[in-house]
Image (tube, rainbow, N blue to C red):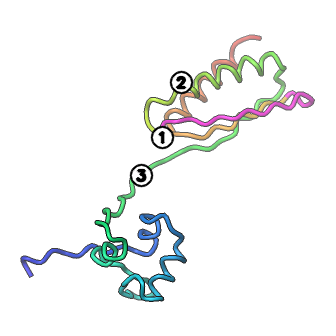
Amino acid sequence: MDGMVQQPYYSVDQVASLLGLHVRTIRTYVRDGRLKATRVGKQYRIAREDLEAFTGTPAPSPARRTRHAEVSGIVQIDAIGPEATTRLTNTVMAVAMGRHGGGTGDRLRVETVYDEERASLKIIVLGGLDTAADLLKVINTVLEQPE
């Protein structure tokens, strides 16, 4: 057993992801015998060599999952006028647009919705934890300034 190399196996979900196909499509290929698989318990496992035979190309390694955290939040600001809303919205958008350097986890997506009748502004924030925290600090700083 010393010289044996362990054969990597893929789950149906991994194969679907690698090939850009729906999981049901892969299961159909397995059931129809077009893609060789081994049943382990209630799930199928596809050997690397069988996947390569099916696609005619070398199989990529299954992607390793990396820990990633994002925030999605809504900041609601009441009793805010149109001028203050414009100033705050412009500042928030400028900060969000300036955050493209650090990769996808650092990217911020921001939407604003202002209800003039209720004098209420909602800022929807989606993005990495650090950049979202920085943006919240900016919002707080702008709000603390006298109008």
Q: Which mark is residue 98?
A: 2
Residue segment shown in magenta: 104-119
Q: Residues within 10 Å of mark 1 (few under 14, many from 20)?
A: few
Q: Position of residue 49 (x, y in %)?
A: 27, 76
Residue 113 shown in magenta: yes
Residue under circle 3? 67
Which comes sooner in the sequence, label 2 or label 1? 2
User: What's the distance in space between the residues labelled 2 and 1, CA to CA?
Assistant: 13 Å
Where residue 5 sits, quadrant-wise, is bottom left
x and y, in percent, of residue 67 in the image: 41, 52
Q: Depth check: 131 or 22 in front?
A: 22
Along the line of sight, which residue is nearer the eye, 105 or 16?
A: 16
Relative placement, left or right, of 39 versus 76 is left
The crowding category of the residue bearing disc 2, from other C-alpha atoms within 10 Å (few below 14, some 14 to 19, many at least 20), is: few
Identify which residue, 79 or 62, lies in the foreground.
62
Secondary element type, mark 1: helix
As drawn, the label of residue 104 is 1
Q: Residue at x 84, y 20 (%)?
A: 81
Residue 81 falls inside the magenta stretch: no
Q: Amino acid at mark 3?
A: Arg
Q: Tell me the kind of residue under disc 2.
A: Gly
